[in-house]
Image (cartoon, rainbow, N blue to C red):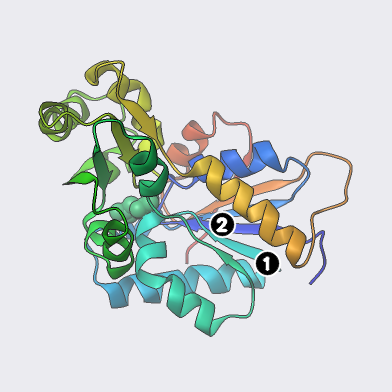
Amino acid sequence: MTNNNPIGLFDSGIGGTSIWTAIHELLPNEDTIYLADSKNAPYGQKSKDEIIHLSCKNTEFLLDQNSKIIVVACNTATTNAITELRNKYKVPFIGIEPAIKPAAINSKQHVIGILATQGTLNSELFHQTVQKFKDTKIIEQIGHGLVPLIENGDINSPEMNKLLHDYLEPMIQANIDYLVLGCSHYPYLIPQIKKILPNHIKIIDSGEAVARQTKKVLMENVGLSNQDKEGKAIFYTNANPKVLTDILKSQYEVKSKDF
Ligand code: DGL
């Protein structure tokens, strides 16, 4: 394994490209390989065993492409499978978890909202995190139906707008001043969410923190790429490539692969 090998990322679908963007902005010279397991999306309602099985399959694909580090660009896969992944494979893993900590620390009302999948909100790792912030009231909401709409390219649909109103209005009533987006698909909904939330409610996701952590772990381990040109990015999907191409604004190579 050398420092010029690619960074591998996977998600249940196209959402983890929000994490890829943050990593590419911070580390533009790194080669990257992104795997969208859209055929199996959403992971959010699957059992822990199924999520572990799919996460291992995704990791093995990325290791076959010589990834020097694996970024699990999915909260659901991280909260359900990262321990098993770290035990099973030697490569360093970066996980993504809902940004409860910065929201709880900065909340003036001591009330925050979190929108995430059922798999994330029910996970042991998430419960452990919540226990650390007992002084903050955390309004949890499962984002039922949001990921399938995003995977279908229906981000701006009336159905999406209705679901977001249904999920966010009770949080507004409860006086939240932070909304944590606990699913890597949800940053693509920020424009619609902003139309619903009053201006004083801040929205946070985990993209930049994951990018900083990826850089730190690479510097402590195999090292950063030393190529002096922009890194090559390859995106693989096992479903209709159009949705991934659209979300990337056609700027990068998308390959179809049955896995
Ligand atoms: N993007 C994923 C996450 O961050 C998973 C969504 C899903 O497949 O349910 O949780």
User: Which of the marked residues, 2 or 1, is nearer the chain's N terminus?
Assistant: 2
What residue is pinned by disc 2? 9
| Residue 42 in view here | no
Q: Is mark 1 within 8 Å of ligand 1?
A: no
* Image height of 240 relative to 189, above or below: below
What residue is pinned by disc 1? 65
- Residue 162 appears at what percent x and percent y? 14, 27
**Cα distance, mark 2 to mark 1?**
11 Å
Residue at left offset 21%, top offset 46%: 138
For residue 75, side relative to residue 89 (left or right): left
- Residue 91 appears at what percent x and percent y? 64, 74
User: Looking at the picture, which amino acid does disc 2 mark?
Assistant: Leu
- Residue at the far bottom: name it: 88
User: Looking at the picture, which amino acid does disc 1 mark?
Assistant: Gln
Label 2 sits on a secondary structure element that is strand
Q: Front-most of 151 and 102?
A: 102
| Residue 219 in view here | yes
Question: Label for residue 151?
Answer: none
> Which dot, 2 or 1, sits closer to the camera?
2
For residue 158, side relative to residue 94 (left or right): left
Residue at left offset 77%, top offset 67%: 222
Question: Which picture quadrant has residue 147?
Answer: top left
* Image height of 117 relative to 81, above or below: above
Residue at left offset 27%, top offset 61%: 131
- Residue 21 appears at what percent x and percent y? 58, 38
